[in-house]
Image (spheres, rainbow, N blue to C red):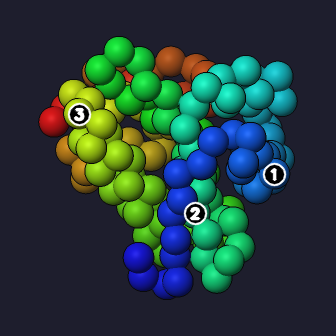
């Protein structure tokens, strides 16, 4: 990882303090997602990717394995660290993790403004636009 980046895979019980801080700043404060939508009760069974830069937690994503695929979501990078390729590193780590676990695909509910970002990794749009937390999304899938 460049820029002194480190991505750890953590369980909720071990990473909830930095994970909560990042998601509250990005989703609840910036994007105005209602807390009851953000905290959906799925965190404890998920695996979490936590990005550190110079020992500071700056980004995250959540993966839930359903049958033979990974549902990837809650991907967030603190505003002051965006544009540094951290999202790329998160997707690459998720892809490697899914392949190591012999999963067939990764599914995401992508905010519409981020569709081109995911397309460059090979994700394909598989749904019409719908609202989630009042934000336009489309489902996307990457098959291996």
- Residue 11 picture location, percent across and down: 63, 42
Q: What element carries label 2?
A: strand
In the image: residue 40, left or right of residue 63: right
- Tell which residue pokes out farthest to the left in this image: 144
- Residue placed most toward the observer, 40 or 67: 67
Q: Count neighbours of disc 1 (C-alpha within 10 A) and say few if under 14, some if 14 to 19, many if 20 or more.
A: few
In this figure, which residue is indicated by the disc labeled 1?
17
Query: Distance of mark 3 from mark 1, alpha carbons?
Result: 30 Å
Mark 3: give few (<14), some (14-19) or many (20+) Cα within 10 Å: few
The residue lying at 38 percent from left, 42 percent from top is 115
- In the rendered image, which quarter is residue 80 located in? bottom right
Instruction: Identify the residue at horizontal 74%, vertical 40% (top origin).
Output: 13
Q: Position of residue 142 (x, y in %)?
A: 25, 35
Image depth: mark 3 or mark 2 in front: 3
Q: Which is nearer the N-term, disc 3 or disc 2?
A: 2
Residue 8 rendering spot, x and y as whole percentages? 54, 59
Residue 57's quadrant in the figure? bottom right
Q: Is 22 rendered above or below residue 65?
A: below
Q: Is residue 82 or residue 101 the one in the foreground?
A: 101
Q: Which residue is drawn at 35% across and 15% down?
A: 67
* Sequence-earlier tag: 3 or 1: 1
Look at the numbered disc 1 and give the secondary structure of its residue: helix
Percent x, y of residue 23: 73, 46
- Identify the residue position indicated by label 2 in the image: 51
Count of numbered marks: 3
Identify the mark nearer the N-term, 2 or 1: 1
Front tag of 3 and 1 = 3
């Amino acid at each position: 990882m460049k820029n002194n980046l480190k991505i750890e895979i953590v369980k909720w019980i071990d990473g909830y303090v930095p994970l909560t801080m990042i998601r509250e700043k990005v989703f609840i404060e910036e994007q105005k997602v209602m807390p009851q939508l953000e905290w959906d009760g799925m965190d404890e069974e998920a695996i979490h990717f936590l990005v550190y830069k110079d020992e500071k937690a700056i980004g995250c994503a959540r993966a839930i394995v359903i049958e033979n695929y990974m549902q990837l979501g809650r991907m967030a990078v603190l505003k002051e660290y965006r544009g540094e390729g951290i999202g790329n590193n998160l997707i690459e780590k998720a892809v490697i993790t899914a392949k190591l676990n012999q999963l067939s695909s990764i599914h995401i509910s992508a905010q519409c403004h981020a569709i081109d970002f995911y397309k460059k990794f090979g994700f394909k749009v598989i749904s019409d636009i719908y609202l989630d937390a009042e934000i336009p999304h489309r489902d996307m899938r990457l098959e291996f």
